[in-house]
Amino acid sequence: MQQGRNASVRGALETLDAEALLLQTYIELLRFAYPGGAEDEPPLREVPLPGRERRERLLAPEGFSFKGASVSGTGDTASPSLSIPGGNPAPRATHRAPLWAYVWEGAAFLDPDSRESALALFRDQGFSRMLLSFSGAEVERLAAPATRKILAAFLASARSQGVAVYLLLGDPEWILPAFRNDLFSLLRFFSGFSFAGIHLDLEPDSLEEAETRREALLGDLLATLREVRRRFPKPLGISIHPRYLEGDLGRIAGPALAKLSLDHVSVMLYSTDTRGVLARFRALQAAHPSLPLGLAQSVEIVLPPEESYAEQGRRAFLRALAAADTAAGEHPGFTGLFVQAWKDFLEVLP
């Protein structure tokens, strides 16, 4: 809840800053609009500020009174609701297909004091699948029995509330034979925890000179996935750039991935051109009908506006997800919508 309160306060302050700049601009333009001074000015000089409805909602004093989340419904499929007194309900996603989130910073979920409220917020926003990553320092701390109990308790709590938590691991070097054992060591370390599955975000294009050796790197990726599948029986999912499912690369990757019986394949189509994204994704669904494809979209603040919905805000992002859910969800193999990333999703303005 503290994150939600901070986001509301930040949004109100940014609104006031924008209004101050706009008013200053109006003042500076007056001398050009009425060069004769006050005698040239009309008797009424009222110019309404844009976004009045949004302004009143953001700045209403009662809008900063947070009483916490109220959860309605029963069982694993309950749909929680977050009420913000004095304002409209926070926008949340409602989808037929599962909604996934990449969680690269999971401290709030692992802290016993904030775990339940963090899970409630996650569920309230419509998410039921979590890809959870750990920093190197967090992995070191998990060697201690007390910390391992904390993670185990979180996984049990999430499972009881209908949230499936997958172990998220991502380092492109792990696809290379020289570094592959590092991945296997981490998977062995986490094998004692009851994760719902494993998700590997191993992006070959992040390696040096990848554009000149994509077919070879694809071979390394596939070899790594086969070995993971052989050694670790957990459900396995991956993130992948769409170019590896198209053209010559797609003709190699598609059949090879299908043989691995993957749990899901998150296709990273990061673009705010909703129509173009859906056309490309549906073409992939048609080309690879046996693959459990899901669509990943970004709300990351660090990406340019043509790739991320951060500047457009959460409502625009959720509208895009709803359109994707309707269009892509018609395919029986659609495994859901993947949001990159949870932290950014919380921080963007509604």
Image (cartoon, helix red, strand yellow):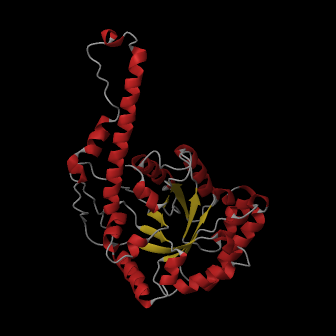
The image position of residue 345, as x and y in percent, is 43, 57
Q: Is residue 255 visible?
A: yes
Residue at image point 57% right, 86% down: 188
Task: Establish if 330 lies above or below 80.
Answer: above
The image position of residue 241, as x and y in percent, is 63, 59
The image quarter containing residue 160 is bottom left
The image quarter containing residue 22 is top left
The image position of residue 44, as x and y in percent, is 26, 17
Q: Is residue 102 left or right of residue 154?
A: right
Task: Establish if 233 lies above or below 116.
Answer: below
Q: Is residue 94 left or right of residue 241?
A: left
Q: Is residue 153 left or right of residue 197?
A: left
Residue at image point 53% right, 63% down: 333
The image position of residue 133, as x and y in percent, is 51, 72
The image quarter containing residue 6 is bottom left
The one nearer the camera, 20 or 92, is: 20
The one nearer the camera, 68 or 265, is: 68
The one nearer the camera, 243 or 344, is: 344
Task: Establish if 343 lies above or below 184.
Answer: above
Residue at image point 21% right, 61% down: 67
